[in-house]
Each structure stands twice: as C-alpha cells, then as structure tokens.
Image (spheres, rainbow, N blue to C red):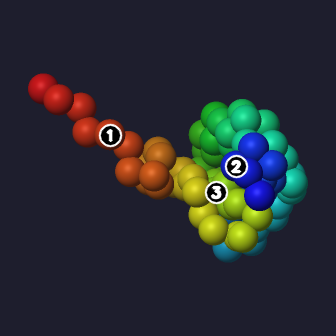
Amino acid sequence: MGQLDQHFSVVQFFSDGHWSYVRRELPPEDAVHLAKRVTEGPLARTGDVARVIITDDSDYCVFEWQYGRGITFPNPPRRRL
C-alpha cells in the first residue's frame, strides 16, 4: 500500500478522560487540516480538548497535540538562535 493510499483518523481526548473519533478514514491532507481545526477550536482553546492525535491505518500515532504544550509529536524542529 502506497502512502497516498493510506487513510488516517483524528481522535480528540477530553479533559474529563473521555475520547472520541472526530473522523475516520481520511486522506492524509484532510486529516491534517481537520486536526488543525480541532486544535484551534473553542474546546481546545479552553482546555476541554486536552489532546488530539492522528493515527494511521495500523493505529500508530503519527501526530500529537496537547493543550498547553502544542505539537508534541513528531518533535518540532528546534529553532536556531
């Protein structure tokens, strides 16, 4: 299976411990755009959404965002001063 044939899921984790799929089986670009919308949405800004991940077809985490920390995986590149 080529990388462009893969599908991805966006999952949100709430501060109360519950979680839910936002959407499943998305093309890669759509998954990234949706995760961005969720992490910038009102529930994420208030901390009600504490974590957002994107998983691949094998259920591996390929992206993680955490409230108060931002993108935690993959590790963001360090800025040179």
Q: Is residue 3 above or below residue 29?
A: below
Q: Is residue 52 at all visible to an observer of this figure? A: yes
The residue that label 1 is drawn on is 77
Give the residue at x 77% y 58%: 1
Q: Residues within 10 Å of mark 3 (few under 14, many from 20)?
A: many
Where does the C terminus fall, quadrant-wise?
Answer: top left
For discs 3 and 2, the disc positioned in front in the rendered view: 2
- Name the quadrant containing residue 8: bottom right
Q: CA distance from mark 3 to mark 1?
A: 19 Å
Q: Which residue is mark 3?
A: 53
Mark 2 residue type:
Gln
> In this orientation, does residue 15 appear?
no
Q: Are marks 3 and 2 in contact (CB under 8 Å)?
A: no
Question: Label 1 near label 3: C-beta < 8 Å?
Answer: no
Q: CA distance from mark 2 to mark 1?
A: 23 Å
In-front residue for pair 23/56: 56
Q: Nearer the viewer, residue 39 or 27?
A: 27
Query: Label 3, label 2: how many angstroms apart (C-alpha)?
Result: 18 Å
**The residue tagged with tag 1: helix, strand or loop?**
loop
Q: Amino acid under label 3?
A: Ile
Instruction: Judge whether 38 appears above or below 72 on screen.
Output: above
Q: Tell me the residue at 82%/60% (across/down).
A: 21
Q: Residue at x 86, y 56 (%)?
A: 24
Depth-wise, is mark 2 or mark 1 nearer the camera?
Answer: 2
Q: Residue at x 81, y 43 (%)?
A: 27
Q: Is 7 placed left or right of 76 in the picture?
A: right
Rendering coords of residue 10 (x, y %): 75, 53
**Is disc 1 surrounded by few (<14), some (14 to 19) or many (20+) residues within 10 Å?**
few
Pointer 2 residue = 3
Left/right placement of residue 75 relative to residue 28 reads left
Residue 60: x %, y % from top left:
63, 68
